Amino acid sequence: MFELILCSLLTIVPDYLYRRYGQGKRIGREITLYSVWYELRWGISACLLLTISLITMIFYFHPSTSNVTAIFRTVTILPETGGRVEEVYVGINQKVQAGDPLFRLNSDAQQAALDASRRKIAEVDAAMKVAQSELASADGEIKQAQGDYQTAVDEYEMKAQLLKNDAVARREVERLETNIDSRKGALDSDIAKKQTLQTQIEELLPAQKASAQAAEKQAQVDLDKTVVRAGVTGTVQQFTLRRGDVVNPLLRPAGILVPESAGKNVLIAGFGQIEAQVLKTGMIAEATCIGRPFTIIPMVVTEVQDVIAAGQYRPTDQLLDVRQVSQPGTLTVFMEPLFTGGLNGVPPGSSCIANAYTNNHDALADKNIGTLRWIFLHVVDTVGLVHAMILRLQALLLPVQTLVLQGH
């Protein structure tokens, strides 16, 4: 409508003024309902062509869309393991901080595993003390064996000396020689026993203790998993757990956690594919939302998705027919407030209307720009004002349309 009125001022009105004052034709006399087309045919034709061109220019270089939403992501409240609810700490719509406990599952099995691992550690510690005591005993046995061995050696040497003078029987010397070997074997056995105890104390028992400590940590982790905590700061929604309920990480979630900053920092808009060459990062935009009526929010385009979601496919066992992609899809654009707190008061999930404006300031500042291009770019930047006026009119009519015409 704005475009038609503006174009009529440049075409139909001058044509009528010429007919009225140049040719003397008056409305109701020479210019009637039946002759208006013939009399004002040049102005009407030029108005239609100019209006179509102006609308095309405005909507191409200053794209608009009503597919704008303050999209936010929720966090599903799920335990890492299934179980029966033992205790619930929060209620519906309660605000929680990151790390706050939400509910606790039955932990008898996990607690038993933790107690068993702790008893295993105590058992290894006791075995360590026993081994150290046996090691001290082994030292005494080695000393005793060394004494017996040395005594046997001394006695053998003495009897061997007497044997040279035939003062002792050879059989007695042979018996003492055998006794030395026996004492030597007993000493080697005691030394080997000590080495075994040292190996147990230095390697085996520490390894068993480390394994038991690892089992204790795992049991503690499993026990901690029975207490489900909030991963982020936010509000608990659809949380109706009661003691005795069974939750499962695959089939039965416990509720939803809405992050505190969800949907308050960005608007996601879907523009037509034809505007893919116009929409660029850094473009200035404006938006008005149903959740915040009569307000124009300055925005800036921060990211333009380089793919169109409608064309995606998931590999299956059937070939994809392109005709199945019936909807053309939109170009996803991310917009953030130009000023801090711009989306304050806009509830996450609100539906909005947005305009993006082409800015040719840098191109116009080029000294080598041609005259026709200079005029064209000035016209492009100027007609953005029409779209801005339309958006403000939509902001005024949006509450009326929602509450009165749609009856919401």
Image (cartoon, rainbow, N blue to C red):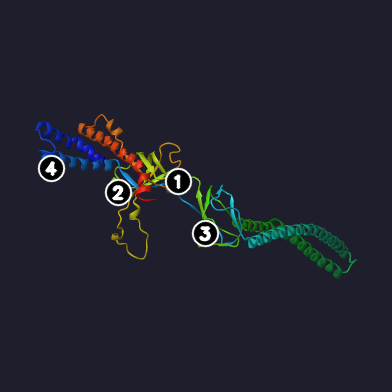
* Residue 292: percent from left, percent from top: 42, 42
Residue at the image position 21 percent from the left and 43 percent from the top: 52
Which numbered disc, 2 or 4, marks the residue that appears first in the sequence? 4
Question: Residue 334's spot in the image, x, y percent?
Answer: 39, 45
Q: Residue at x 31, y 38 (%)?
A: 389
Secondary structure beneath label 2 = helix
Inspect the image, locate mark 3, and give the three-letter code of the amino acid beneath it. Pro
Q: CA distance from mark 4 to mark 1?
A: 51 Å
Q: Position of residue 139 (x, y in %)?
A: 79, 57
- Between disc 3 and disc 4, the foreground one is 4
| Label 3 vs label 2, nearer the camera | 3
Mark pair 3, 4: CA separation = 69 Å
Compared across the picture, whether 68 is left or right of 113 comes to left
Element at label 3: loop
- Observer-nearest residue: 404 or 222? 404
Which numbered disc covers residue 253?
Answer: 3
Instruction: State the residue position of label 2.
Output: 273
Does the image show residue 11? no
Instruction: Find numbered disc 1 in the image and state the secondary structure of the residue it sits on.
Output: loop
Asked if residue 121 is positioned above or below residue 48 in the image, the reply reads below
Mark 1, residue position: 347
Mark 3 in CB contact with mark 4 (< 8 angstroms)? no
Q: Earlier in the sequence, mark 3 or mark 4?
A: 4
Specify whether 88 is left or right of 336.
right
Question: Which amino acid lies under the numbered mark 2 shown in the image of this protein?
Answer: Gln
Dot in front, 4 or 1: 4
Cβ–Cβ under 8 Å for marks 4 and 1: no
Q: Which residue is mark 4?
A: 37
Place residue 153 in its image quadrant: bottom right
